[in-house]
Amino acid sequence: MYLYVRGVSMQTIDSILTERREFMPEQSFQSSANISFSDYQELCRQAEEDYEGFWARFARENLVWGRGFTRVLNEEHAPFYKWFEDGQLNVSFNCLDRHLPHHSAKPAIIFEADDGQVTSVTYADLHQQVGRCANALKSLGLVSGDRVVIYMPMSIEVVVAMQACARIGVIHSVVFGGFSAKSLGERIADAKARLVITADEGLRGGRTLPLKSTCDEALTYPGTETVEKVLVYRRTGGDVAFFPDRDLWWDVLVSKQPSDCEALLFDAEHPLFILYTSGSTGKPKGVQHSSAGYLLGAILSMRWVFDYKADDVFWCTADVGWVTGHTYVAYGPLAVGATQVIFEGVPTWPHPGRIWDMIFRYGVNVFYTAPTAIRSLIKLGPDLPLNYDLSSLRLIGTVGEPINPEAWMWYYEKVGRSRCPVVDTWWQTETGSHMIAPLPGACLAKPGSCTRPLPGIMADIVDDKGQNVQNGQGGMLVIKKPFPSLLRTLWNDPERFQQVYFPDNFQGRWYLSGDSAHRDADGYFWIMGRIDDVLNVSGHRLGSMEIESALVAHPQVAEAAVVGRYHEIKGESIVAFVVMKGTMLTEDEADVMALELSEWVTEQIGRIARPDEIRFGENLPKTRSGKIMRRLLRSIARREQIDSDISTLENPQILAQLGRACATRSP
Ligand code: PRX
C-alpha cells in the first residue's frame, strides 16, 4: 500500500550517499557550553518521563508571566493544541522591559545599511521607540487582534514595528520586501489587514526597491479595501506618491508619540503573527503562531543551539520577511538580551567580502546564514574568508536547505577555521524554532546531517503505514507529539491546516513535516529534501539531495539541482542542472564536463544515480529566500510550458537560459 502525500506516493526512500567524516567540538568549547553531553541526556530523559512537566518547567524559567499558567497542554481539540492556555504575558515585555533593570544601556541592535551607514540602539532606546510606535498604532484605532501587514526593508524600524504590534496584541504579518504587488495584495487581502507599514524605498546592492509604489499598486487589488491607513517610513527620501487621506509619514506620526506604552497582558495562545509561506501549489498558507509557545521555542534554541552567552554578538543574516528573521532577529535575540547585528542589502555588495569584513568589524561571535548564501560566497571567492580576521567567531550555523557536505566542509574550514562548531539547524516556518540540530558542546557533527532532535522534540522517520523505517532507509519526517512553538493553524483555513500537517493516515496526531529523511546507526537525521522532490529511478526512490551533494562535491561545481523526468523503462530518469564555479562553459566544454560529472556521480554514489542529462546555467531558479524551485526545473526537464505563478521567483530570466541550455546527454 502506498500513502499519497501531497500527490506523491510514498513508501520508503533509498539512501545512497555515505558521509563518514566526524568532528568533535574542541575541549574548550565543550567545557564552557550551556549544555554538556550529560545535560543533554538528562534533558531527553526528563522529556520522555514527564513531557508536560518538562515544558512547564522551561516555560516558567524562561518567560516572564503576568499571570502564571496552571494548565500545560490542552489536547481536547487536537490537532488544535493549546499550551499554557490560562497564563498571560506580553511578548514585547519579554523582549525589552525585562532587560531594563540591569541592561538598559546594552546595545540591542547594530544596523549596517546598504550604503555602509551604521546605526545602533540600546535596549533603553529600543524600548522607547517601540513604545512610540505602539502608541502611534493605538492612535490609529488599532486594537488587539487587528492585523497589520509590514512591508519594509531591513532596518531597526522594522523590528520596532513588529515589537510594537506585539506590545498591543496586534497581529503582524511581515511580507518580504522583494515580493511583487500581486503577492503583497494577496497577503493583505487574506489577512484583512487594517494597516500597512511600508517605506518609501529600500536599498539592495546599490539599487532602490520601490516599496511604496508596489504597496500602492497592491492596494488596488480586490480584497484589500480593509486597509484604512498606510504608515510610511522615510528610508531614502525618494520621491513617492503620497495620498493624504490614507498615507501617514512615520517620522511625523511616530516621533510625536509618548515613549511610554504599557505592556498589556495577553493570553499565552493569543496569535503573535501570521507569516505566509508558499505551498507547493495554490495560494500561500498563512502560518499562525502563538505568543508564549513560540517565544519559548525562540529562547530555548538561542540558549541550547546557539549556546548564547551574555557577551555574545549575534548575527543572523536573514531578512525579517522570513521565519528565520522573526525567530532569530525580531524575537529570540531580544528575548535573551543579546547584542545583534542586522544588515540591509546583500552579502556580496559593495564587495564580495562584505560578510567577512562585518564579522571582523563587529566582533561577531555567533553567525547564522543559509546554504544558498554559503554556496554563492564559495562561488565568489573560495579563499576570500582567509583574508579576514574571523577570530571572534565561536559558533556558526546554517538553515533553510540541506547543506551539501562539501559546502559544510568549506564553511567549517574556511569560515570557522576548523575551530567553531557548525550547527546545521532543521526547522520550518511552521515549527517556529529549531527542531533537529546539534547542541554544539554535546554533539559530534557530521557534515550534511542536522544531527538529532532537540530534547522534547519527538521526531521520527516512518513509512506510509506509520512504521519506523530501518536505519539508512529514507521515509517521512514526522513529529509525534505537539510542542509549544508549533503553528496553531492556517489563518482562515483550519481544514487545510489539518489536511496538510495532520493527515488522517496517522490518526491526525502526528505532525507531518513534508520532508523526507533517513537516520544512521548513531540516530543522526539526514534530510533528503521535500517529499515532493523524491525521484523514482528503476524502482529506487532517491532523494534529490544526495545526488546534488555528489555533484557539488566535484571541485568545479558550485551548485546543482536534480529532478526526474518520465522514462519508459526506468520510471524516471535523472536530469541535473549544474552551475559551475567561474564562467559559463562553451558548448564543447559542456559536453566534456557532462561526461566527467556523470562518471563522478557514478563513482561517488553508483550507476543508479548517474544523470541522463546535464544542463549548465549561470544560476538556478530560486525563491526569494534562496530555495531552489525544483518544480520549475521539472517543467524545463519535461519540456513543459511553465504556466504556474513565477512572481515569487528571485531570478525569472534564468528559466529561459536553462530551457535553451544545450541538453547534453551523458552516454
Ligand atoms: O525542506 C526543509 C528545508 O526548508 C524547509 C522549511 O522552509 P521554511 O519554512 O521556508 O523555513 C526555512 C527556515 C527554517 C524544510 O521543510 N530546511 C530548513 N532547514 C533545513 C532544511 N533542510 C535541510 N536541512 C536544514 N537544516
Image (tube, rainbow, N blue to C red):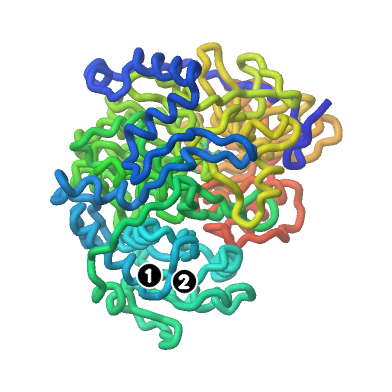
Point 63% across, 22% down: residue: 15
Residue where numbered disc 2 is placed: 195
Q: CA distance from mark 2 to mark 1?
A: 9 Å
Point 70% across, 51% down: residue: 636
Q: Is residue 83 left or right of residue 36?
A: right
Q: What element does badge 2 sit on?
A: strand
Point 44% across, 18% down: residue: 46
* Residue 137: mark: 1
Q: Is residue 466 left or right of residue 655?
A: right
- Counting residues from the start of the chain, the first of labels 2 and 1 encountered is 1
The one of 53 and 235 positioned closer to us in this rendering: 53
Report x, y in % for residue 243: 44, 86
* Residue 451: mark: none
Report x, y in % for residue 653: 58, 61
Report x, y in % for residue 293: 45, 40
**211 shown above or below 310:** below
The one of 436 and 62 positioned closer to us in this rendering: 62
Residues at circles 2 and 1 in contact by the CB criterion of under 8 Å: yes
Point 63% across, 60% down: residue: 646
Question: Could you classify mark 1 by the number of other residues whose Cα lies within 10 Å: few (under 14), some (14-19), or many (20 or more)?
Answer: many
Report x, y in % for residue 265: 37, 52
Q: Residue furthest right?
A: 568
Question: Could you classify mark 2 by the number of other residues whose Cα lies within 10 Å: few (under 14), some (14-19), or many (20 or more)?
Answer: many
Q: Residue furthest bottom?
A: 244
Residue kind at label 2, given as amino acid type:
Leu
The one of 654 and 448 positioned closer to us in this rendering: 448
